[in-house]
Image (cartoon, rainbow, N blue to C red):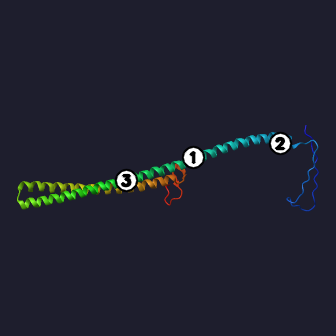
Amino acid sequence: MAESQDIELILPDEEVDPRAADVIQESGGDFNSSEVADPQNEELEEYSDGVKKRIDKLTYRMREAERQKEEAIEFAKKISEQNNQLQTKLKSSDSTLVNEYQQRIESDKERARRALKEAQELGDAEAIALATEAVAKTSYEAQNAERLVARQNKRQNKKLSRLSYLKGEMYNQLLPTHKLKHGQRKTVGLVKTLV
């Protein structure tokens, strides 16, 4: 059974500041505070260990997620660089092929015109017909080359606009967002917000 302690309180006549008051404790001989606090301290330490483990686990998960995000970003950058290099090579080889094709057509056209002129000077009807056919053929190929250049330019413009769109989408995905009510999202850091 616990023993009762007698506490004697002496109050001064004037007002006392509680922060300046002296507290005097008299030790009771049989009261041992460590016996009462031990079960509570053990429970607190067990609880504290559980919380520490949970915090460590959550910290590990957070760092792992950050590491994976960084790896994904680096991978995307490498793939983007490789894609850009391949696009550049393809564009330069396409341009080279189209230029060579146009030059070949121009030289064939000049050759066909010279042949037509010579055939007309000689008055050879069969040579005139063959030369006229060659001029028509080279004119048709020249039109094809012009269409090819126009298609190549159109494709290049389309790729540039798509690339700028994709870069914007990738940038938006990397920005932090806040969820709003009703599943709407608001992107932080942009002037335009989606609400």
Say if mark 2 contacts mark 1, CB within 8 Å.
no
Residue identifier under label 3: 89
In front of the other: 173 or 94? 94
Residue identifier under label 1: 65
Amino acid marked by disc 1: Ala
Left or right of 38 on screen, residue 174: left
How far apart marks 3 and 1 lie (CA) works out to 36 Å
Q: Earlier in the sequence, mark 3 or mark 1?
A: 1
Single out the mark in the foreground, 2 or 3.
3
Of helix, strand and loop, which one carries label 1?
helix
Amino acid marked by disc 3: Lys
Residue identifier under label 2: 37
In front of the other: 79 or 167? 79
Q: Position of residue 75 (x, y in %)?
A: 49, 48
**Would you call the spot at circle 2 few (<14 residues within 10 Å), some (14-19), or many (20 or more)?**
few
Count the numbered circles shown: 3
Q: Which residue: 8% across, 55% down?
A: 127
Say if mark 2 contacts mark 3, CB within 8 Å.
no
Q: Earlier in the sequence, mark 2 or mark 3?
A: 2
Q: Which residue: 63% across, 46% down?
A: 59
Q: Which residue: 68% across, 42% down?
A: 53
Q: Position of residue 76 (x, y in %)?
A: 48, 50
Left or right of 89 on screen, residue 118: left
Amino acid marked by disc 2: Ala
